[in-house]
């Protein structure tokens, strides 16, 4: 079924009829089936779903470029959109940097997507929420489960026309014990692969382990960052570092060809690793792109405009906001390329049995991969999550933010105390720089972004130091 592509082609033909020969036009038609089940106080309080069709048109006429969008596909609605965008182009400024259209290009088929995920109903999501709540063992829970399907058609006046589909499911929830929260989240291609019970158990175990935290003096501490925290690193590296527009404006730390990261770090953007579209929003084929190879920065991402500025080819990273925010990798995964700096084990498992009952601190570590990293840290902090992160200095990517959902002191490879949340100020590239990465976890967990279609695949990381500058209140 190529309904969206057919509509896109119709709009291209309409531009030619109304504007005559010469204009360049590209059209993107997206049908999004988005659904969200929210829960709070351990009960579902909202089910929302929407089906939205958006037609986005960009034209280049007589050296001028204009764009617009509409949420209609009727003949009158499409004609009104074309007339409005052509009128805007006639009075707009000259655009000497116009990169032209994507030529007709062979395209890989869209990956097979799961219909049960794309068209999941509220009962399907409610089953997962119930499993999460039950597994939390009486703790108060909150969060969401979402499903999404995107059907996208693209056509331009250069004769390029393609169709693609993408589906995903995600769950993000917390459990609360007293004033302490524990979190668990996951993003998958198939709703059937979400395990609500496992996520609920993990969140509850972390909440119980985070009870009765102690104050810790600010300073530079070795850390183990769990995947949720590492996802924040990847998001900011993508947005501010490997962004072709920011690189062109000299606002990025990136220096291709330079060993800017520890040799244990490899970063790959791969929109087709999950169920993603086989092309970007300019019709350029999507592909895996290595941005950091064993510590050496190798590339930034481009749309057609930033690529033309540098005399290179687009990497297929145009997205809805790339004209203003710049092209950025939105499916970034951190891959271990070695064990540089790995220290010998210092004390066995992260937490041993406690006489007289179950030690709640054992729940601070909820997977074997993170436990192995913790066991090799002599003294430092285990950090579950980062939030409210804001850039202080873009060029060196110095960021300030807070920990949340659990921080613990580690001594001799064992979790010994829960710690109150801390504020940090840290350069993300420096924290991952040469000699700074002690160990990369073997297993990566896909973390959902705030918007469907973007995700970050992150393992746990053991780092030499992280700069904590105060408590959460200052």
Image: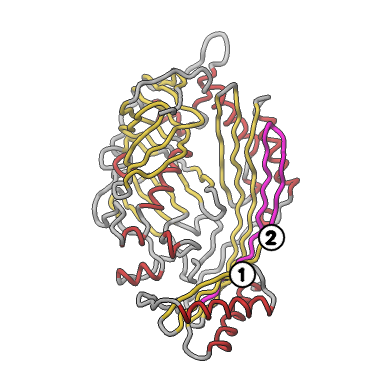
Question: The residue tagged with tag 2: helix, strand or loop?
Answer: strand
Q: Which residue is mark 2?
A: 51
Q: Nearer the viewer, residue 80 or 155?
A: 80
Tell me what residue is drawn at x 61 percent, y 30 percent.
175
Q: Residue furthest right?
A: 123
Residue 151 x/y as whole percent:
62, 65
Residue 214 x/y as whole percent:
44, 18
Up the image or down, 6 lies above or below 444; here it is below
Query: Is residue 444 rendered magenta in the image?
Result: no
Q: Residue furthest left?
A: 258
Q: Give the distance between the C-alpha atoms of the residues marked 2 and 1, in whole angstroms.
A: 14 Å
Quarter of the image where one finds residue 264:
top left
Question: The residue tagged with tag 1: helix, strand or loop?
Answer: strand
Of marks 2 and 1, which one's residue comes earlier in the chain?
2
Left or right for 318, reference 243: right
Tell me what residue is drawn at x 52 percent, y 48 percent.
449
Q: Which residue is mark 1?
A: 70
Query: Is residue 43 rendered magenta in the image?
Result: yes
Tell me what residue is drawn at x 59 percent, y 21 percent.
178
Q: Main secondary structure of the magenta part?
A: strand
Residue 466 x/y as whole percent:
33, 33
């Amino acid at each position: 079924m190529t309904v969206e592509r057919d509509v896109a082609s119709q709009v291209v033909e309409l531009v030619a009829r109304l504007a005559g020969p010469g204009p360049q036009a590209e059209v993107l038609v997206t049908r999004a089936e988005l659904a969200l089940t929210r829960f709070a106080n351990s009960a579902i309080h909202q089910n929302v779903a929407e089906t939205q069709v958006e037609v986005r048109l960009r034209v280049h006429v007589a050296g001028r470029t204009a764009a617009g969008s509409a949420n209609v596909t009727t003949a009158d609605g499409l004609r009104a959109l074309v007339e409005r965008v052509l009128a805007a182009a006639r009075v707009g400024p000259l655009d000497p940097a116009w990169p032209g259209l994507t030529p007709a290009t062979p395209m890989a088929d869209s990956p097979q997507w799961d219909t049960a995920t794309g068209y999941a109903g509220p009962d399907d999501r409610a089953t997962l929420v119930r499993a999460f709540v039950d597994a939390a063992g009486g703790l108060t829970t909150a969060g969401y489960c979402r499903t999404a399907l995107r059907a996208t058609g693209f056509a331009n006046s250069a004769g390029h026309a393609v169709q693609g589909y993408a589906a995903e499911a995600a769950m993000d929830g917390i459990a609360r014990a007293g004033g302490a929260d524990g979190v668990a989240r996951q993003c998958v291609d198939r709703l059937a692969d979400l395990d609500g019970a496992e996520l609920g158990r993990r969140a509850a175990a972390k909440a119980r382990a985070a009870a009765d935290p102690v104050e810790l003096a600010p300073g530079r501490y070795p850390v183990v960052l769990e995947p949720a925290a590492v996802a924040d690193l990847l998001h900011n590296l993508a947005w501010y570092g490997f962004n072709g527009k920011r690189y062109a404006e000299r606002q990025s730390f990136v220096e291709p060809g330079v060993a800017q990261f520890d040799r244990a770090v490899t970063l790959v953007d791969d929109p087709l690793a999950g169920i993603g579209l086989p092309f970007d929003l300019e019709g350029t084929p999507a592909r895996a792109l290595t941005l950091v190879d064993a510590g050496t920065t190798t590339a930034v991402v481009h749309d057609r405009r930033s690529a033309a500025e540098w005399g290179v080819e687009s990497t297929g990273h145009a997205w809805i906001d790339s004209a203003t925010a710049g092209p950025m990798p939105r499916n970034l995964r951190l891959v271990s390329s070695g064990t540089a700096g790995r220290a010998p084990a210092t004390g066995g498992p992260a937490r041993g049995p406690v006489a007289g009952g179950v030690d709640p601190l054992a729940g601070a570590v909820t997977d074997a991969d993170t436990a192995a990293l913790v066991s090799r840290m002599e003294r430092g902090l285990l950090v579950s999550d980062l939030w409210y992160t804001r850039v202080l200095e873009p060029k060196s990517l110095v960021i300030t933010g807070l920990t949340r959902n659990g921080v613990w002191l580690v001594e001799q490879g064992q979790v010994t105390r829960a710690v109150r949340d801390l504020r940090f100020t840290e350069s993300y590239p420096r924290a991952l720089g040469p000699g700074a990465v002690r160990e990369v976890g073997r297993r990566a967990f896909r973390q959902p972004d705030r918007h469907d279609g973007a995700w970050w695949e992150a393992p746990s990381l053991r780092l030499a130091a992280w700069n904590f500058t105060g408590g959460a209140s200052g």
